[in-house]
């Protein structure tokens, strides 16, 4: 089994930032019953999505945002450039001050929101309650991915190595780390995330126990094209985010 690193530190929601559905007058638009995982170009390291240093460093939070931007580009059909694994690691170490400490997802999102990421940007972000599956589906459908934090067990590592989905049977073993995975698709049986260079299915029953946090991330391309936030009050959300850094 290849080296599988972690790196998600315990999460927090900044005071003054509300859950995504708060920024909608009424209920959010209903997401479709299925969103397919998009196809992305083959990566130079031989994995379909790129390990992005997460076999050597606990940079899953940085790899996760890069994978999310890759999905957004694929869904919109745009030709965009993405960093190499070495560049992702250097961005991570620049953020952490040179130490392999991992990241708090909300803090890292705030950093990318302020500083950008290799020509890509986060226009806004908001938390999603991890057990609110309709809103999680909406985030994946509307913004192409959800940026999430989970707990990983030793049995989940073994299932990943065998190419198996993550299910309830994988929970009865030691928790080995906190991990960041972008959820990039779903159907009636699974959520599909990207981790350690490939697509990993997660049953909803398993998700209920392993999920700690989820974030809707609105890529800058949506705002640059004049989109209104795809069902939410983007101006109100951006105002709340602005108040966090003022």
Image (cartoon, helix red, strand yellow):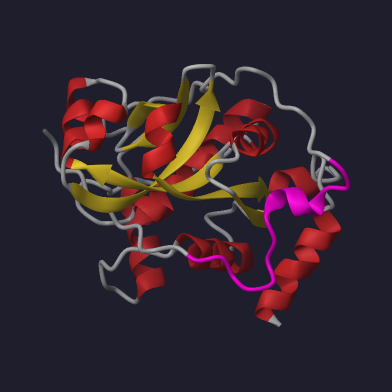
- In-front residue for pair 58/136: 136
What is the x, y in percent for residue 105? 47, 60
Q: Say above or below: 83 vs 75.
A: below
Left-right relation of 171 to 194: left
Q: Quadrant of the N terminus?
A: top left
Q: Give the quarter of the image for residue 62.
A: bottom left
- 43 shown above or below 190: below
Quarter of the C terminus within the rendering: bottom right
Magenta stretch secondary structure, dominant? loop
Residue 63 x %, y % = 40, 48
Q: Residue furthest left?
A: 1
Magenta stretch containing residue 207, yes or no? no
Q: For the image shown, how many numbered marks are present on the structure? A: 0
Q: Is residue 66 visible?
A: yes
Residue placed at 55% from the left, 42% from the top?
Answer: 146
| Residue name at image x 31 percent, y 22 percent | 165
Residue 98 position within the rendered picture, expressed as x and y whole percent measured from the top left: 29, 73
Q: Residue at x 36, y 43 (%)?
A: 210
Toward which corner of the image does residue 197 lie, by quadrant? top left
The stretch of residues the image draws in magenta is 12-26
Q: Nearer the viewer, residue 82 or 34?
A: 34
On whether residue 19 falls in the magenta region, the answer is: yes
């Amino acid at each position: 089994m290849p080296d599988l690193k972690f790196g998600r530190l315990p999460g927090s929601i900044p005071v003054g930032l509300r859950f995504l559905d708060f920024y909608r007058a009424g209920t959010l638009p209903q997401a479709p019953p299925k969103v397919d995982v998009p196809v992305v170009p083959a990566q130079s390291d031989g994995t379909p999505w790129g390990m992005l240093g997460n076999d050597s460093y606990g940079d899953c939070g940085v790899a996760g945002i890069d994978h999310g931007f890759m999905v957004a580009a694929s869904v919109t059909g745009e030709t965009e450039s993405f960093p190499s694994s070495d560049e992702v690691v250097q961005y991570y170490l620049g953020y952490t001050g040179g130490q392999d400490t991992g990241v708090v997802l909300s803090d890292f999102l705030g950093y990318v929101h302020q500083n950008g990421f290799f020509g890509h940007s986060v226009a806004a972000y908001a938390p999603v309650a991890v057990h609110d599956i309709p809103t999680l589906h909406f985030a994946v459908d509307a913004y192409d991915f959800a940026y999430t934090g989970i707990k990983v067990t030793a049995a989940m590592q073994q299932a990943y190595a065998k190419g198996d989905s993550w299910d309830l049977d994988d929970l009865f073993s030691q928790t080995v780390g906190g991990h960041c995975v972008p959820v990039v698709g779903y159907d009636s049986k699974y959520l599909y995330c990207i981790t350690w260079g490939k697509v990993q299915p997660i049953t909803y029953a398993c998700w209920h126990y392993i999920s700690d946090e989820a974030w809707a991330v609105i890529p800058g391309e949506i705002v640059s094209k004049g989109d209104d936030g795809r069902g939410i009050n983007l101006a109100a959300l951006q105002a709340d985010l602005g108040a966090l850094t003022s």
